[in-house]
Amino acid sequence: MNVEARQKAREILKQYEKHGWTLRRVLLSDATCRMLAASLENLFGDAPIEAFKTDALWFSRAVAANGNESWELRRITGAPFALLRVFSADISENARKAARRATEKRLLDGNQS
């Protein structure tokens, strides 16, 4: 992640926070993780960082009064691109994790086209 991509990540974080989203997970390539090692906490706070084939951010926010929760996976670089998942309040964490992994796969498939 070069300086331009780092700035883009900051802009994305600011935009999502402005609209009530919370950064939940950070997906980074090995190269990006090494490049940002000294500034990961400053940039992403205490959000868990996971190894991934591209750089992306997972955000979440509650959906009104129905108890559902929206999760959005936002690619950091390239053309703006995001994928949304909505989880009902009664879905298990294992089911959520499987759905997030499927969404991550869709993001990677989109990067290859």
Image: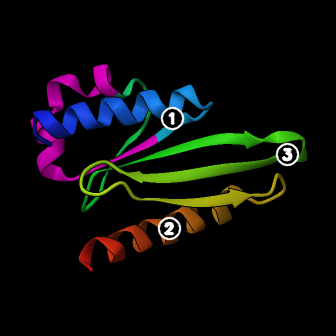
Q: Quadrant of the N terminus?
A: top left
* Image x and y of residue 100, in percent: 54, 62
Q: Which residues are magenta?
A: 25-43
At 60% from the left and 42% from the top, the residue drawn is 60
The answer to whether 54 appears left or right of 14 in the picture is: left
The image quarter in which residue 93 lies = bottom right
Residue placed under numbered mark 1 in the picture: 16
Q: Quadrant of the C terminus?
A: bottom left
Residue placed under numbered mark 2 in the picture: 103
* Image x and y of residue 50, in percent: 34, 48
List the single residue furthest toward the top: 42
Circle 3 SS class? loop
* Image x and y of residue 64, in percent: 83, 40
Residue placed under numbered mark 3 in the picture: 67
Dot 3 crowding, Cα within 10 Å, few <14, some 14–19, many 20+: few
> Amino acid type of disc 3?
Gly
What secondary structure is the stretch in magenta mostly built from?
helix
In this picture, is 28 found above or below 96? above
Between the C-alphas of marks 2 and 1, the distance is 19 Å
The answer to whether 86 appears left or right of 101 in the picture is: right
At 46% from the left and 32% from the top, the residue drawn is 15
Q: N-terminal of the two: label 3 or label 1?
A: 1
In this picture, is 107 found above or below 76? below
Between the C-alphas of marks 3 and 1, the distance is 20 Å
Query: Between residues 67 and 17, which one lies in front from this camera angle?
Result: 17
Magenta region includes residue 30: yes
Circle 2 SS class? helix
